[in-house]
Image (cartoon, rainbow, N blue to C red):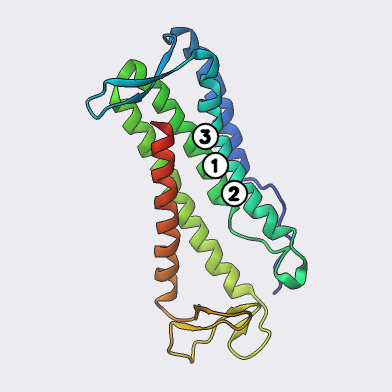
Amino acid sequence: MPFQRSPLLSAWDFATLAGLLGLGGFYLWILPQLPDPVPTKFTSLGQACAWTPKGQLAWLVFGMPLFLWGVLFLVGAAVALLPQKAGGGMRVPVHPMRGLLGLGGCLLMVGCVLTVQQGLTALYSGMLAFGVCLVLGLVFVLRDTWQAIGRLPRSGPGRRGVLYVNPQDPRLWVEKPVGVGWTLNFAHPAAKWVMALLVAGVLAVLAAAVRTFAR
């Protein structure tokens, strides 16, 4: 069964939209209560060590979740708009991660702003909410990726599309069926765990960058 053409937007993006609307209402409500400048970075003891003028706070609060959503939107659009022979136009499992990371970024920003009034507990709560969204996004990505692999049409022995899927081959890593280098044998039982570790590593780096940016 061939892939369906992937839309640039999906129902998952409503999660980010809902988060932005909620964040907007929260921002309008809390802005008059905040000092000017607003503390936006804290030490491990909860003491403020950096401040942002009120007039520039919106760029930080809304910029981070929009940046996360925008990066993954560009990734999904690039894949969807590739020529069919290059593997484009396929339904890629980026939509759940995009929607959930955008929502998680909004929740993280709520926690960051509330830190001014409620201390580090609010910040850690926001980080926890972001982490939950990150893990859920990873779960959906892995699930949809494995379902998509199973639907790929075979184009040769041990191949589905440009992927290598051969249950009779005991090797985990094989030479790429298309291009130069090595790839996974996606029929190997350990392949899904390798994919999970690779994706988790990328997301861990992303989460560390977001934490640094947010604090």
The answer to whether the residues at label 1 and label 2 have Cβ atoms under 8 Å apart is: yes
Neighbour tally class for label 2: few under 14, some 14-19, many 20 plus, Cα within 10 Å: some
The answer to whether the residues at label 1 and label 3 have Cβ atoms under 8 Å apart is: yes
Q: Position of residue 6 (x, y in %)?
A: 71, 58
At x 65% / y 54%, what residue is drawn?
Answer: 76
| Residue sitting at the far left | 45
Task: Report which residue position mark 1 lands on.
Answer: 68
Marked residue nearer the N-terminal end (2 or 3): 3
Residue 93 located left or right of residue 116? right
Q: CA distance from mark 1 to mark 2?
A: 7 Å
Q: CA distance from mark 2 to mark 3?
A: 13 Å
Neighbour tally class for label 3: few under 14, some 14-19, many 20 plus, Cα within 10 Å: some
Q: Amino acid at mark 2?
A: Leu
Seen from the viewer's position, the closer of residues 196 and 48 is 48
Which element is circle 1 on?
helix
Q: Position of residue 158 (x, y in %)?
A: 58, 88
Q: Amino acid at mark 1?
A: Leu
Q: Position of residue 173 (x, y in %)?
A: 45, 82
Task: Report which residue position mark 2 lands on.
Answer: 72
Neighbour tally class for label 1: few under 14, some 14-19, many 20 plus, Cα within 10 Å: many
At x 45% / y 67%, what residue is drawn?
Answer: 195
At x 69% / y 53%, what residue is drawn?
Answer: 77
At x 43% / y 11%, what residue is drawn?
Answer: 34
Task: Report which residue position mark 3 lands on.
Answer: 64
Name above or below for residue 172 compared with residue 97.
below
Q: Amino acid at mark 3?
A: Met
Name above or below for residue 202 compared with residue 27.
below
Name above or below for residue 24 compared with residue 133.
above
Quadrant showing the N terminus: bottom right
Where residue 13 sits, quadrant-wise, is top right
